[in-house]
Image: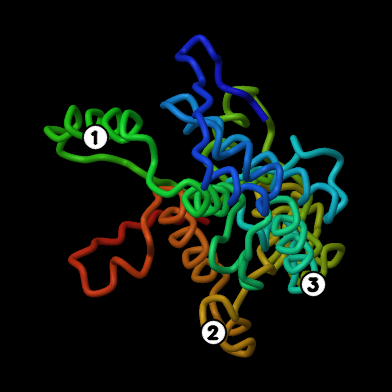
Amino acid sequence: MDVPDASHGPVVVAEQEPEQEEQEGVLGEWASRVRKLTGKQGDLLRQKLITGLICRHTAEILEYDSAEAIDSELPFKDLGYNSLTSVELRSRLAADLGIALPSSLVYDYPTPAVLARHIVRDLVGAPDPEAVDAVLAGVEDASDEPLAIVGMACRYPGGVVSPEGLWGLVAEGGDAIGGWPEDRGWDVEGLYDAERGVPGKSYARYGGFLQGADGFDAEFFGISPREALAMDPQQRLLLETAWEALERSGIVPQSLKGSRTGVFVGAMT
Protein backbone atom coordinates (compact mmCIF):
# COMPACT_ATOMS: atom_id res chain seq x y z
CA MET A 1 0.00 0.00 0.00
CA ASP A 2 1.29 3.51 -0.77
CA VAL A 3 1.51 5.79 2.25
CA PRO A 4 0.81 9.50 1.56
CA ASP A 5 3.79 11.85 1.69
CA ALA A 6 3.99 13.38 5.16
CA SER A 7 5.23 16.65 3.66
CA HIS A 8 1.63 17.53 2.76
CA GLY A 9 0.87 18.27 6.37
CA PRO A 10 1.65 17.08 9.90
CA VAL A 11 -0.11 14.13 11.45
CA VAL A 12 -1.29 15.30 14.83
CA VAL A 13 -1.73 12.85 17.68
CA ALA A 14 -4.72 13.93 19.70
CA GLU A 15 -4.55 14.14 23.46
CA GLN A 16 -6.84 11.51 24.91
CA GLU A 17 -9.55 12.34 27.36
CA PRO A 18 -9.83 9.93 30.33
CA GLU A 19 -13.13 8.52 29.02
CA GLN A 20 -11.56 7.84 25.63
CA GLU A 21 -8.64 6.00 27.26
CA GLU A 22 -11.05 3.74 29.13
CA GLN A 23 -12.98 3.01 25.96
CA GLU A 24 -9.83 2.20 24.01
CA GLY A 25 -8.93 -0.31 26.68
CA VAL A 26 -11.48 -2.64 25.10
CA LEU A 27 -10.69 -1.61 21.53
CA GLY A 28 -8.09 -3.40 19.46
CA GLU A 29 -4.66 -1.93 18.75
CA TRP A 30 -5.64 -1.08 15.19
CA ALA A 31 -8.72 0.84 16.32
CA SER A 32 -6.63 2.81 18.79
CA ARG A 33 -4.12 3.72 16.09
CA VAL A 34 -6.92 4.92 13.83
CA ARG A 35 -8.46 7.08 16.54
CA LYS A 36 -5.15 8.77 17.32
CA LEU A 37 -4.78 10.12 13.79
CA THR A 38 -6.21 13.59 13.28
CA GLY A 39 -6.02 16.37 10.70
CA LYS A 40 -6.40 16.20 6.94
CA GLN A 41 -3.42 13.87 6.55
CA GLY A 42 -4.78 11.72 9.35
CA ASP A 43 -8.00 11.12 7.41
CA LEU A 44 -5.97 9.79 4.48
CA LEU A 45 -3.85 7.59 6.72
CA ARG A 46 -6.89 6.11 8.45
CA GLN A 47 -8.24 4.90 5.14
CA LYS A 48 -4.83 3.56 4.09
CA LEU A 49 -4.34 1.83 7.44
CA ILE A 50 -7.65 -0.03 7.48
CA THR A 51 -7.54 -0.81 3.74
CA GLY A 52 -4.08 -2.29 4.27
CA LEU A 53 -5.35 -4.41 7.17
CA ILE A 54 -8.23 -5.76 5.08
CA CYS A 55 -5.94 -6.51 2.13
CA ARG A 56 -3.42 -8.25 4.40
CA HIS A 57 -6.05 -10.56 5.85
CA THR A 58 -7.51 -11.14 2.38
CA ALA A 59 -4.11 -12.20 1.06
CA GLU A 60 -3.70 -14.65 3.96
CA ILE A 61 -7.23 -16.07 3.80
CA LEU A 62 -7.36 -16.46 0.01
CA GLU A 63 -3.65 -17.33 -0.33
CA TYR A 64 -2.56 -14.41 -2.49
CA ASP A 65 1.17 -13.76 -2.75
CA SER A 66 0.94 -10.52 -0.77
CA ALA A 67 -1.39 -7.73 0.33
CA GLU A 68 -0.07 -5.66 -2.58
CA ALA A 69 -1.63 -8.20 -4.96
CA ILE A 70 -5.12 -7.24 -3.72
CA ASP A 71 -7.03 -4.59 -5.68
CA SER A 72 -8.95 -2.73 -2.97
CA GLU A 73 -11.54 -1.55 -5.51
CA LEU A 74 -12.37 -5.08 -6.67
CA PRO A 75 -15.55 -6.67 -5.23
CA PHE A 76 -14.94 -9.31 -2.57
CA LYS A 77 -16.74 -11.92 -4.68
CA ASP A 78 -14.30 -11.26 -7.54
CA LEU A 79 -11.37 -11.61 -5.16
CA GLY A 80 -12.58 -15.12 -4.36
CA TYR A 81 -14.61 -14.82 -1.16
CA ASN A 82 -17.42 -17.21 -0.31
CA SER A 83 -19.68 -17.53 2.72
CA LEU A 84 -17.03 -19.31 4.82
CA THR A 85 -14.08 -17.08 4.00
CA SER A 86 -16.19 -13.94 4.45
CA VAL A 87 -16.98 -15.03 8.01
CA GLU A 88 -13.28 -15.61 8.63
CA LEU A 89 -12.48 -12.07 7.43
CA ARG A 90 -15.18 -10.68 9.72
CA SER A 91 -13.76 -12.60 12.70
CA ARG A 92 -10.19 -11.45 12.04
CA LEU A 93 -11.18 -7.80 11.67
CA ALA A 94 -13.37 -7.92 14.77
CA ALA A 95 -10.45 -9.36 16.76
CA ASP A 96 -7.98 -6.75 15.48
CA LEU A 97 -10.32 -3.79 15.94
CA GLY A 98 -12.14 -4.87 19.08
CA ILE A 99 -15.54 -3.98 17.61
CA ALA A 100 -18.62 -5.96 16.63
CA LEU A 101 -19.02 -6.54 12.90
CA PRO A 102 -21.95 -8.20 11.08
CA SER A 103 -21.57 -11.58 9.40
CA SER A 104 -22.89 -9.99 6.19
CA LEU A 105 -19.91 -7.62 6.11
CA VAL A 106 -18.63 -8.36 2.60
CA TYR A 107 -22.16 -8.16 1.17
CA ASP A 108 -23.07 -4.90 2.90
CA TYR A 109 -19.74 -3.28 1.93
CA PRO A 110 -18.71 -5.14 -1.26
CA THR A 111 -15.08 -3.97 -1.75
CA PRO A 112 -12.10 -3.57 0.60
CA ALA A 113 -12.09 0.21 -0.01
CA VAL A 114 -15.82 0.57 0.74
CA LEU A 115 -15.49 -1.60 3.84
CA ALA A 116 -12.50 0.43 5.05
CA ARG A 117 -14.48 3.67 4.75
CA HIS A 118 -17.32 2.15 6.77
CA ILE A 119 -14.96 0.95 9.52
CA VAL A 120 -13.23 4.33 9.74
CA ARG A 121 -16.58 6.11 10.04
CA ASP A 122 -17.65 3.60 12.68
CA LEU A 123 -14.49 4.20 14.70
CA VAL A 124 -14.11 7.97 14.50
CA GLY A 125 -17.49 9.28 13.38
CA ALA A 126 -17.58 12.29 11.08
CA PRO A 127 -14.37 13.16 9.17
CA ASP A 128 -12.11 15.98 10.25
CA PRO A 129 -13.69 19.43 9.55
CA GLU A 130 -10.60 20.56 7.61
CA ALA A 131 -10.91 17.55 5.32
CA VAL A 132 -14.62 18.22 4.82
CA ASP A 133 -13.90 21.87 3.97
CA ALA A 134 -11.29 20.79 1.43
CA VAL A 135 -13.74 18.41 -0.26
CA LEU A 136 -16.52 20.99 -0.29
CA ALA A 137 -14.15 23.57 -1.77
CA GLY A 138 -13.35 21.16 -4.58
CA VAL A 139 -17.04 20.58 -5.21
CA GLU A 140 -17.73 24.32 -5.28
CA ASP A 141 -14.88 24.87 -7.73
CA ALA A 142 -16.43 22.28 -10.05
CA SER A 143 -20.00 23.49 -9.61
CA ASP A 144 -19.94 25.33 -12.93
CA GLU A 145 -18.95 22.20 -14.84
CA PRO A 146 -21.82 20.85 -17.00
CA LEU A 147 -20.87 17.25 -16.26
CA ALA A 148 -18.81 15.42 -13.64
CA ILE A 149 -17.65 11.82 -13.88
CA VAL A 150 -17.52 10.50 -10.33
CA GLY A 151 -17.36 6.77 -10.91
CA MET A 152 -16.53 4.34 -13.69
CA ALA A 153 -16.48 0.58 -14.17
CA CYS A 154 -15.49 -1.57 -17.12
CA ARG A 155 -14.54 -5.01 -18.37
CA TYR A 156 -12.11 -5.47 -21.26
CA PRO A 157 -10.09 -8.31 -22.75
CA GLY A 158 -6.72 -8.98 -21.22
CA GLY A 159 -8.06 -9.40 -17.71
CA VAL A 160 -8.99 -5.71 -17.36
CA VAL A 161 -11.64 -5.33 -14.63
CA SER A 162 -11.20 -1.67 -13.65
CA PRO A 163 -10.40 1.75 -15.19
CA GLU A 164 -6.98 1.57 -13.49
CA GLY A 165 -6.34 -1.77 -15.15
CA LEU A 166 -7.30 -0.36 -18.54
CA TRP A 167 -4.98 2.60 -18.07
CA GLY A 168 -2.15 0.28 -17.04
CA LEU A 169 -2.68 -1.89 -20.12
CA VAL A 170 -2.62 1.15 -22.43
CA ALA A 171 0.32 2.84 -20.66
CA GLU A 172 2.42 -0.32 -20.84
CA GLY A 173 1.44 -1.06 -24.42
CA GLY A 174 0.10 -4.44 -23.34
CA ASP A 175 -1.53 -7.02 -25.59
CA ALA A 176 -5.09 -8.03 -24.66
CA ILE A 177 -5.34 -10.72 -27.34
CA GLY A 178 -5.35 -14.31 -26.14
CA GLY A 179 -6.52 -17.81 -26.89
CA TRP A 180 -10.13 -18.91 -26.91
CA PRO A 181 -11.63 -19.11 -23.41
CA GLU A 182 -12.32 -22.59 -22.09
CA ASP A 183 -15.00 -21.60 -19.57
CA ARG A 184 -17.87 -20.99 -22.02
CA GLY A 185 -18.76 -24.49 -23.10
CA TRP A 186 -17.24 -24.05 -26.55
CA ASP A 187 -15.77 -26.88 -28.57
CA VAL A 188 -12.47 -25.05 -28.90
CA GLU A 189 -10.85 -27.60 -31.20
CA GLY A 190 -13.98 -28.07 -33.29
CA LEU A 191 -14.34 -24.33 -33.93
CA TYR A 192 -11.02 -24.02 -35.74
CA ASP A 193 -10.59 -24.45 -39.46
CA ALA A 194 -7.53 -23.26 -41.34
CA GLU A 195 -9.65 -22.35 -44.35
CA ARG A 196 -11.38 -18.97 -44.31
CA GLY A 197 -15.11 -18.67 -44.83
CA VAL A 198 -16.16 -22.09 -43.55
CA PRO A 199 -19.62 -21.62 -41.93
CA GLY A 200 -19.55 -21.93 -38.15
CA LYS A 201 -15.75 -22.06 -38.08
CA SER A 202 -12.91 -19.65 -37.34
CA TYR A 203 -9.54 -19.61 -39.08
CA ALA A 204 -8.00 -17.76 -36.12
CA ARG A 205 -7.20 -19.28 -32.75
CA TYR A 206 -6.87 -15.97 -30.90
CA GLY A 207 -9.05 -12.98 -30.10
CA GLY A 208 -9.99 -10.40 -27.51
CA PHE A 209 -12.12 -12.19 -24.91
CA LEU A 210 -13.44 -11.16 -21.51
CA GLN A 211 -12.31 -13.39 -18.68
CA GLY A 212 -14.68 -14.85 -16.11
CA ALA A 213 -17.78 -14.32 -18.24
CA ASP A 214 -19.34 -17.37 -16.57
CA GLY A 215 -19.02 -15.89 -13.07
CA PHE A 216 -22.11 -14.09 -11.77
CA ASP A 217 -23.53 -13.64 -8.26
CA ALA A 218 -27.19 -14.16 -9.15
CA GLU A 219 -28.31 -14.24 -5.52
CA PHE A 220 -26.82 -10.80 -4.87
CA PHE A 221 -29.03 -9.31 -7.59
CA GLY A 222 -32.11 -11.30 -6.58
CA ILE A 223 -32.04 -13.44 -9.73
CA SER A 224 -32.73 -17.18 -9.77
CA PRO A 225 -29.96 -19.49 -11.06
CA ARG A 226 -32.20 -20.61 -13.95
CA GLU A 227 -32.91 -17.02 -14.97
CA ALA A 228 -29.21 -16.15 -14.74
CA LEU A 229 -28.34 -18.97 -17.15
CA ALA A 230 -30.94 -17.71 -19.62
CA MET A 231 -29.64 -14.13 -19.54
CA ASP A 232 -27.31 -12.73 -22.17
CA PRO A 233 -23.82 -12.56 -20.57
CA GLN A 234 -23.74 -8.86 -21.49
CA GLN A 235 -26.79 -8.32 -19.28
CA ARG A 236 -25.00 -9.91 -16.35
CA LEU A 237 -21.90 -7.80 -16.93
CA LEU A 238 -24.08 -4.69 -17.17
CA LEU A 239 -25.58 -5.37 -13.75
CA GLU A 240 -22.15 -5.95 -12.21
CA THR A 241 -20.48 -2.90 -13.72
CA ALA A 242 -23.43 -0.58 -13.03
CA TRP A 243 -23.34 -1.55 -9.36
CA GLU A 244 -19.56 -1.25 -9.26
CA ALA A 245 -19.63 2.25 -10.81
CA LEU A 246 -21.96 3.37 -8.01
CA GLU A 247 -19.67 1.81 -5.40
CA ARG A 248 -16.61 3.54 -6.82
CA SER A 249 -18.42 6.90 -6.83
CA GLY A 250 -19.47 6.56 -3.20
CA ILE A 251 -23.18 6.64 -4.10
CA VAL A 252 -25.52 4.38 -2.14
CA PRO A 253 -27.44 2.51 -4.87
CA GLN A 254 -30.67 2.48 -2.85
CA SER A 255 -30.59 6.29 -2.71
CA LEU A 256 -31.34 6.44 -6.45
CA LYS A 257 -34.63 4.57 -6.17
CA GLY A 258 -37.40 6.73 -7.64
CA SER A 259 -34.96 9.45 -8.74
CA ARG A 260 -34.57 11.00 -12.20
CA THR A 261 -31.45 9.03 -13.04
CA GLY A 262 -30.30 8.34 -16.58
CA VAL A 263 -28.39 5.19 -17.48
CA PHE A 264 -25.97 5.29 -20.42
CA VAL A 265 -24.23 2.09 -21.41
CA GLY A 266 -21.65 1.19 -24.02
CA ALA A 267 -21.15 -2.39 -25.20
CA MET A 268 -19.29 -3.86 -28.13
CA THR A 269 -18.80 -7.34 -29.50
- Residue 237 place in picture, x, y as percent: 54, 64
Nearer to me, 126 or 148: 126
Callout 1: SS: helix
Looking at the rendered structure, the kind of residue marked 2 is Ile
Residue 104 falls in image quadrant: bottom right
Q: Residue at horizontal 67%, vertical 63%?
A: 77
Relative to residue 24, is residue 225 depicted above or below?
below
Residue picked out by circle 3: 84
Residue 138 relative to residue 242: left or right = left
Residue 258 relative to residue 264: left or right = left
Q: How is the image coloured?
A: rainbow
Relative to residue 45, is residue 74 depicted above or below?
below
Callout 2: SS: loop
- Residue 74 place in picture, x, y as percent: 61, 50
Looking at the rendered structure, the kind of residue marked 3 is Leu
* Mark 1 crowdedness (10 Å alpha carbons): few <14, some 14-19, many ≥20: few
Furthest-front residue in this view? 18
Residue picked out by circle 2: 223
Is mark 2 in CB contact (under 8 Å) with mark 1? no
Residue picked out by circle 1: 136
Spatial CA distance of label 2 from label 1 is 39 Å
- Residue 224 place in picture, x, y as percent: 58, 88
Q: Residue at horizontal 22%, vertical 29%?
A: 137
Q: Nearer the viewer, mark 2 or mark 3?
A: 3
Name which of mark 2 and mark 1 comes first in the sequence: 1
Looking at the rendered structure, the kind of residue marked 1 is Leu
Is mark 1 in CB contact (under 8 Å) with mark 3? no
Residue 128 relative to residue 165: left or right = left
* Mark 2 crowdedness (10 Å alpha carbons): few <14, some 14-19, many ≥20: few
- Residue 119 place in picture, x, y as percent: 55, 52
Quarter of the image containing the N terminus? top right
